[in-house]
Amino acid sequence: METIGLLDFLTLVSAIGCGLVAGIFFAFSTSVMKALGNLPPEQGIAAMQSINVAIINPWFLTPFLGTAVTCVSMAIASLVRWDDPRAWYWLGGGVVYIVGVLLVTMIFNVPRNDALAAVAPASSKAATLWVAY
Protein backbone atom coordinates (compact mmCIF):
# COMPACT_ATOMS: atom_id res chain seq x y z
CA MET A 1 0.00 0.00 0.00
CA GLU A 2 1.39 3.39 -1.01
CA THR A 3 1.72 5.96 1.73
CA ILE A 4 0.26 9.41 1.30
CA GLY A 5 2.82 12.20 1.17
CA LEU A 6 2.56 15.60 2.79
CA LEU A 7 1.70 17.32 -0.49
CA ASP A 8 -0.99 14.76 -1.23
CA PHE A 9 -2.43 15.35 2.23
CA LEU A 10 -2.32 19.15 1.78
CA THR A 11 -4.02 18.78 -1.60
CA LEU A 12 -6.81 16.76 0.00
CA VAL A 13 -7.22 19.17 2.93
CA SER A 14 -7.22 22.14 0.53
CA ALA A 15 -9.88 20.54 -1.66
CA ILE A 16 -12.10 19.76 1.34
CA GLY A 17 -11.63 23.29 2.70
CA CYS A 18 -12.45 24.85 -0.67
CA GLY A 19 -15.58 22.74 -0.87
CA LEU A 20 -16.70 23.73 2.61
CA VAL A 21 -16.14 27.44 1.99
CA ALA A 22 -17.83 27.26 -1.42
CA GLY A 23 -20.82 25.57 0.21
CA ILE A 24 -21.06 28.30 2.84
CA PHE A 25 -20.87 31.03 0.20
CA PHE A 26 -23.38 29.25 -2.06
CA ALA A 27 -25.93 28.76 0.72
CA PHE A 28 -25.49 32.31 1.92
CA SER A 29 -25.87 33.80 -1.57
CA THR A 30 -28.79 31.67 -2.69
CA SER A 31 -30.88 31.69 0.47
CA VAL A 32 -29.77 33.95 3.32
CA MET A 33 -29.26 37.09 1.22
CA LYS A 34 -32.53 36.48 -0.65
CA ALA A 35 -34.38 36.09 2.65
CA LEU A 36 -32.79 39.23 4.09
CA GLY A 37 -33.71 41.14 0.93
CA ASN A 38 -37.36 40.26 1.49
CA LEU A 39 -37.36 41.90 4.92
CA PRO A 40 -37.96 45.58 5.60
CA PRO A 41 -34.57 47.38 5.67
CA GLU A 42 -34.53 47.83 9.45
CA GLN A 43 -35.09 44.11 10.06
CA GLY A 44 -32.72 43.02 7.29
CA ILE A 45 -29.96 45.27 8.61
CA ALA A 46 -30.42 44.07 12.18
CA ALA A 47 -30.32 40.43 11.01
CA MET A 48 -27.22 41.01 8.87
CA GLN A 49 -25.47 42.78 11.73
CA SER A 50 -26.18 39.75 13.90
CA ILE A 51 -24.97 37.34 11.21
CA ASN A 52 -21.72 39.31 10.80
CA VAL A 53 -21.02 38.93 14.52
CA ALA A 54 -22.06 35.28 14.70
CA ILE A 55 -19.96 34.21 11.69
CA ILE A 56 -16.74 35.01 13.53
CA ASN A 57 -16.39 31.60 15.13
CA PRO A 58 -14.08 28.59 14.79
CA TRP A 59 -16.58 26.64 12.65
CA PHE A 60 -16.29 29.28 9.94
CA LEU A 61 -12.80 30.67 10.50
CA THR A 62 -11.06 27.27 10.54
CA PRO A 63 -12.05 26.29 7.00
CA PHE A 64 -11.92 29.89 5.71
CA LEU A 65 -8.45 30.80 7.03
CA GLY A 66 -7.13 27.24 7.28
CA THR A 67 -7.79 26.70 3.60
CA ALA A 68 -5.93 29.93 2.86
CA VAL A 69 -2.92 28.56 4.74
CA THR A 70 -3.02 25.24 2.88
CA CYS A 71 -3.49 27.01 -0.47
CA VAL A 72 -0.50 29.28 0.14
CA SER A 73 1.48 26.17 1.12
CA MET A 74 0.42 24.44 -2.08
CA ALA A 75 1.38 27.47 -4.19
CA ILE A 76 4.81 27.57 -2.56
CA ALA A 77 5.17 23.81 -3.04
CA SER A 78 4.39 24.26 -6.72
CA LEU A 79 7.30 26.65 -7.11
CA VAL A 80 9.67 24.42 -5.17
CA ARG A 81 8.60 21.29 -7.09
CA TRP A 82 7.94 22.86 -10.48
CA ASP A 83 9.02 19.66 -12.25
CA ASP A 84 6.07 17.79 -10.67
CA PRO A 85 3.19 17.47 -13.16
CA ARG A 86 0.78 18.62 -10.42
CA ALA A 87 2.61 21.92 -9.87
CA TRP A 88 0.30 23.92 -12.17
CA TYR A 89 -2.74 22.61 -10.30
CA TRP A 90 -1.27 23.48 -6.92
CA LEU A 91 -0.35 26.97 -8.07
CA GLY A 92 -3.65 27.58 -9.87
CA GLY A 93 -5.78 26.32 -7.01
CA GLY A 94 -3.84 28.32 -4.45
CA VAL A 95 -4.03 31.55 -6.43
CA VAL A 96 -7.74 31.15 -7.20
CA TYR A 97 -8.59 30.65 -3.52
CA ILE A 98 -6.36 33.43 -2.21
CA VAL A 99 -7.52 35.96 -4.80
CA GLY A 100 -11.10 34.81 -5.36
CA VAL A 101 -12.03 34.10 -1.77
CA LEU A 102 -9.66 35.67 0.74
CA LEU A 103 -8.78 38.92 -1.06
CA VAL A 104 -12.30 39.52 -2.43
CA THR A 105 -13.70 39.02 1.07
CA MET A 106 -11.14 41.32 2.71
CA ILE A 107 -11.19 44.05 0.05
CA PHE A 108 -14.91 44.15 -0.80
CA ASN A 109 -17.10 42.29 1.70
CA VAL A 110 -15.49 43.19 5.03
CA PRO A 111 -15.62 46.96 4.40
CA ARG A 112 -19.30 46.68 3.40
CA ASN A 113 -20.02 44.67 6.54
CA ASP A 114 -18.12 47.18 8.68
CA ALA A 115 -20.10 50.07 7.18
CA LEU A 116 -23.34 48.21 7.88
CA ALA A 117 -22.24 47.49 11.45
CA ALA A 118 -21.65 51.20 12.08
CA VAL A 119 -25.23 52.33 11.39
CA ALA A 120 -28.36 52.18 13.49
CA PRO A 121 -30.83 49.87 11.68
CA ALA A 122 -33.68 52.40 11.91
CA SER A 123 -31.72 55.37 10.52
CA SER A 124 -32.30 56.84 7.06
CA LYS A 125 -28.59 56.33 6.29
CA ALA A 126 -29.02 52.62 7.06
CA ALA A 127 -31.94 52.26 4.64
CA THR A 128 -29.89 53.85 1.85
CA LEU A 129 -26.90 51.67 2.68
CA TRP A 130 -29.09 48.55 2.72
CA VAL A 131 -30.35 49.14 -0.82
CA ALA A 132 -26.75 49.16 -2.08
CA TYR A 133 -25.78 46.24 0.15
Image: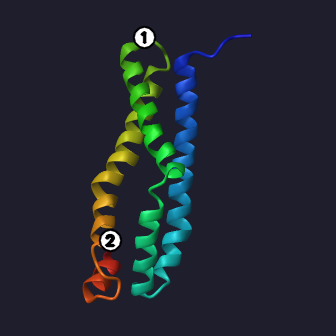
C-alpha separation, residue under disc 1 versus residue under disc 2: 48 Å
Whether 14 is drawn above or below 46: the answer is above
Q: Determine which of the numbered discs, if any, sits on residue 126 in the image.
A: none
Identify the amino acid type marked 1. Answer: Asp
Q: Residue 21 appears at what percent x and percent y?
A: 51, 49
Whether 128 is drawn above or below 13: the answer is below
**Category of crowding for the residue at label 1, using alpha-carbon neighbours closer than 10 angstroms: few (below 14), some (14–19), many (at least 20):** few
Residue at the spot 53% in from the left edge and 58% down from the top edge: 26
Asked which secondary structure carries label 1, the reply is loop
Of the two numbered discs 1 and 2 on the same chain, state the one appearing first in sequence: 1
* Image quadrant containing the C terminus: bottom left
Tell me which colouring the rendered structure shows.
Answer: rainbow
76 sits left or right of 12 in the view: left
Q: Which residue is mark 2?
A: 117
Q: Residue 70 appears at what percent x and percent y?
A: 46, 31
**Category of crowding for the residue at label 2, using alpha-carbon neighbours closer than 10 angstroms: few (below 14), some (14–19), many (at least 20):** some
Q: Which residue is mark 1?
A: 83
Identify the amino acid type marked 2. Answer: Ala
* Image quadrant containing the N terminus: top right
In this view, the residue farthest toward the right is 1
